[in-house]
Amino acid sequence: MDQLTLDDIHLADTAFWRRDDRDHWFGRFRRERPVAWQAAFDGDGEPTGEGFWSLTRHADVREVSRDTNRFRSGHGTGMFTESDDEAYIVGGMLNRDPPLHTKLRRIVAKIFTPRLLQDLEASMALRARQVIGSISEQGACDFAADIANQMPMGVICDMLDVPETDRPHLQHLTVTALGHGDAEIGDFRNSYQAFLDLNAYGEDLARARRKTPGDDLISVLVAADLDGEKLSDFDIGIYFQLLITAGIETTASSIAQGITFLARHPGQWRAWRDDYECLVATALEEIVRYASPVVHFGRTVAEDTAIRGQAIEAGQKVVIWYNAANRDEDVFDDPDRFDIRRNPNDHVGYGGGGVHHCLGMHLARREMYHFFKLLFETMPDLEVDLDALRPINGMFINGVRALPCTYSPTRLAS
């Protein structure tokens, strides 16, 4: 590591994401080269001759996130510039700018407000009980696959009224779509096909709901009015894909990584377990800060501008790194320390603010609230095998593929 320099580190090269010292290098960029030009690579790991400006400071992530006039989403929010059609297929409203983004977001935004989520509290608590109850008598399982993935998948699929039998396949497609760069998933070509498969599944649901509407989110989309027009099945399929990918993997990553942080800090684990309600709010925010389940987003520069004195041309791409911003020394005291009591905690784990802030952040908080509460109550001696942890080394999500755990078998009261 000491023999390398920042010039040797290429953030768009999948090889970098298999390193276990990524935080070190992001820290170097943040302190020494906060606005850094990075070469782009194609699916075979070869430089394309293009590139992007990498932004690793908290203030810059906030600035780019909130200024939708200078920094646009319509050409994709990844590292590379896409056509409008390509960007829409893989991100829907995420890859659209106001005013269209605002109109598309408004369709379901009201459902994800804290007030309306109160109606889902009982179902989230029940889902936590179902997930933990399904493995509680075994004494051992894979915490990532059998527990962490199951909680958010169950909640969002319930909201979308997805058949139980289809859910494991959708979860697999979600990881493939978002995990490009990971050695087991492959490059963006594999991920792109997963996006298409999720879109197609959503289209099928839309056609079914047109015939038999219900009270689920797909039925809400079918009935939605967008300036006097209905969403097409194609549009609803893409909307479905965005809801399910955002709804499953980000929260699953936070839960799985959260338990690893607690395992490495057993004193904090005991303190939270012993005084759950007092510490839950700050603990959940610290988990999201420390995990940064979504690693980056990109924006296209709409007009010639400058960031920290560096001239950036219209049409160039900037990439904002949430994982780096969440360790910014200018914002967080001792940022590499995990602290469930950290307050204030101005992290960007749910985005940097502005119109694109995470639609499901309130839902994610309540899911994790119910999950950890029941977990602490029913599995007080849970132990995870950190040596056997297998991460998802993707370029977009900071997830966990496998995490074996053991605990005393127990039966949950019905």
Image: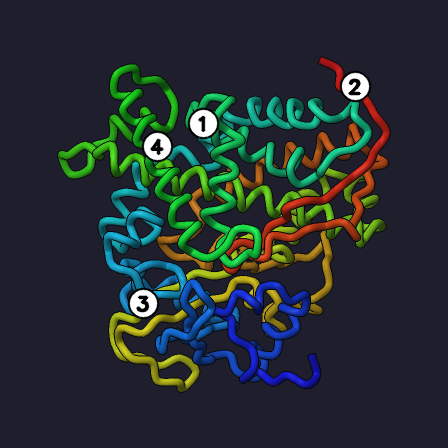
Residue at mark 4 = 202
Secondary structure at badge 2 equals loop
Secondary structure at badge 1 equals helix
Residue 281 shows up from this direction: no
Q: Residue 218 at what x, y percent from top left? A: 34, 28
Please name the residue shown 56% across and 59% down the image: 347
Q: CA distance from mark 2 to mark 3?
A: 53 Å
Q: Are marks 1 and 2 in contact (CB under 8 Å)?
A: no
Residue at mark 1 = 159
Q: Which mark is residue 411?
A: 2
Question: Which callout, 4 or 2, points to the residue nearer the camera?
Answer: 4
Q: Amino acid at mark 4?
A: Gly
Of mark 1 and mark 4, the one earlier in the sequence is 1
Residue 277's quadrant in the figure? Answer: top right
Residue at mark 3 = 300
**Is the N terminus in the top left, top right, bottom left or bottom right quadrant?**
bottom right
Question: Which callout, 1 or 4, points to the residue nearer the camera?
Answer: 4
Q: CA distance from mark 1 to mark 4?
A: 13 Å
Q: Are marks 1 and 4 in contact (CB under 8 Å)?
A: no
